Image (cartoon, rainbow, N blue to C red):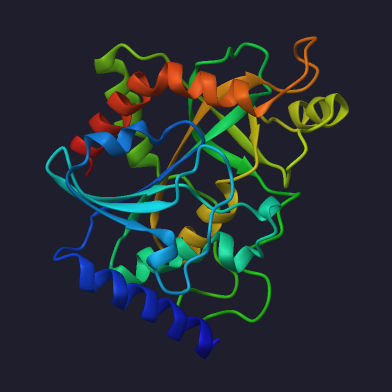
Amino acid sequence: MVDTIERLDKTAHYLKSKIDFVPEIAIVLGSGLGKLADFIEGSIEIPYEEIPDFPRTTVVGHEGKLIFGTLKNRKVVAMKGRFHYYEGNDMDAVVYPMRVFKRLGIESIIVTNAAGGVNTEFIPGHLMLITDHLSFFCENPLRGENIDELGSRFPDMSVVYDRDLRKIAMESARKLGIDLKEGIYSYCKGPSYESPAEIRALRLMGADAVGMSTVPEAIAARHMGMRVLGISCITNMAAGVLDQPLNHEEVMETGKKVEQKFSALVSSIVENWK
């Protein structure tokens, strides 16, 4: 555990040497949602491969760099490319950036993702505010010896996604005329898409959307006492909802179609952050 803390502090120390401010908010950009980074002013871009002990991303649509700067007069850092369990990473690598952000002094995070629609009232292009999650199929990122310096052994997960931040998100959407849905996000390990039977089971359990990210990051962030806001972009309908195969190209195409709406919403949320 001492080694983990030393690695985190080594990474944080390197990043501090490249910036002269502590970001207020970290933003994790999901597949096809990286356009928001273009709105960050005075940006300092740091490729992952230059950051000590930082993992590498291998997924199309995830460029692999941190972008520090200002968004709507607030200091932020955006992750343009995240790390997934299905890439062969262990969970320590998947949540490593969250822990680095905390060591930098960041207290809040916005996690975004591309997701499949489980709720049959959703359509591709909808944005969904995450109210809760299902993580039965998630290798818990806190498994193993607890790092007491980061958080308690048995952290409460009653309210993972901050209620006050969700109110700000809904109000921002209302002002922008965006039909922001609300729902429960279910994590599955991937990389194969879920089967129709699995989607039916998830729907019975209350899931509205499904994806292969976000939940490990949210759990790790809450373990450290960070405030979390989650937003899904429904890029396709989950298996069995429509009579057609699923593919990553559709995810990227839908993300591109909604990038302006998504960027406007997140920018407004950051502007009204409390």
With respect to residue 71, does 53 lie above or below? below
Tell whether 41 sits left or right of 81: left
- Residue displayed at 14% across by 66% down: 20
With respect to residue 109, does 15 lie above or below? below
Residue 252 in percent (x, y) is at: 54, 26
Considering depth in this image, is 163 or 54 the residue closer to the camera? 54
Residue 119 in percent (x, y) is at: 66, 19
Considering depth in this image, is 216 or 84 the residue closer to the camera? 84
- Residue displayed at 39% across by 41% down: 163
Q: Residue furthest bottom?
A: 2
Give the quadrant of residue 114: top right
Q: Is residue 149 visible?
A: no
Residue 216 in percent (x, y) is at: 59, 55
Give the quadrant of residue 235: top right
- Residue displayed at 68% across by 70% down: 143
With respect to residue 108, does 20 lie above or below? below
